[in-house]
Image: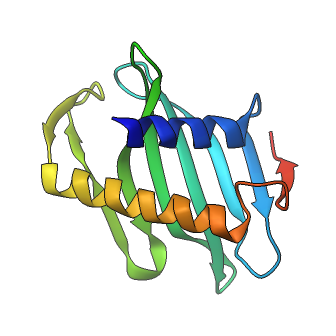
């Protein structure tokens, strides 16, 4: 639970009151953070992504989408999906019905994405994306 609360703190802190920002740190791929709408349950969805370029096309490397839950003691951000365009990979923790409501969960993938996100967020911190050394550009 504390891990998901940490994810929420980082993501909402990076966005602030904006809906899309790009963070740059010399020597690393830029990091984009975007509010991408609401889940079928009405919760906020936030994407965090490094973009590369291949043959003029933007490529996600990787992109993770998190759902922000308003838990009683603190907001929490649950990883929902992982995408890497260079690998042709899209993984989603849940299956959804036509109304966007969750119908099934892949618990193994859910744990893998939680573990990956913990490592990624730690790397982002060490690289300077989560500190004052990152240049923050508001996109919208």
* Vertical position of residue 89 compared to residue 131: above or below: below
On screen, residue 32 versus residue 61, left or right, reads right
Q: Provide residue 120's location: percent of width, then percent of height.
A: 50, 64
Q: Residue at x 54, y 40 (%)?
A: 46
Residue 14 picture quarter: top right
| Corner quadrant of residue 128 | bottom right
Q: How many marks?
A: 0
Tell whether 48 sits left or right of 132. left
The part of the image, by quadrant, that contains residue 105 is top left
Q: Is 88 rendered above or below residue 66?
A: below
Extreme residue toward the top, this view: 72
| The C terminus lies in quadrant | top right
Q: Nearer the viewer, residue 135 or 50?
A: 135
On the rendered structure, is 65 left or right of 131? left
Tell me the residue at 76%/47% (across/down).
21
Q: Position of residue 2 (x, y in %)?
A: 39, 37
Q: Nearer the viewer, residue 31 or 124?
A: 124
Which image quarter holds the N terminus? top left
Residue 39 is situated, as x and y percent measured from the top left of the image, at 40, 28
Residue 127: x percent and y percent?
69, 70
User: Which sits in the foreground, 68 or 97?
Assistant: 68
């Amino acid at each position: 639970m504390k891990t998901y609360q940490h994810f929420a703190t980082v993501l909402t802190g990076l966005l602030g009151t904006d809906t899309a920002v790009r963070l740059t740190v010399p020597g690393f791929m830029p990091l984009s953070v975007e509010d991408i709408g609401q889940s079928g349950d009405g919760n906020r969805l936030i994407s965090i992504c490094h973009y590369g370029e291949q043959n003029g096309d933007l490529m996600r490397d990787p992109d993770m989408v998190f759902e922000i839950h308003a838990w009683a003691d603190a907001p929490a951000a649950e990883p929902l999906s992982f995408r890497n365009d260079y690998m042709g990979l899209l993984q989603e923790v849940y299956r959804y019905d036509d109304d966007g409501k969750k119908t099934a969960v892949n618990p193994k993938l859910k744990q893998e994405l939680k573990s990956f996100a913990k490592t990624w967020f730690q790397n982002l911190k060490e690289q300077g994306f989560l500190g004052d050394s990152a240049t923050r550009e508001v996109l919208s």
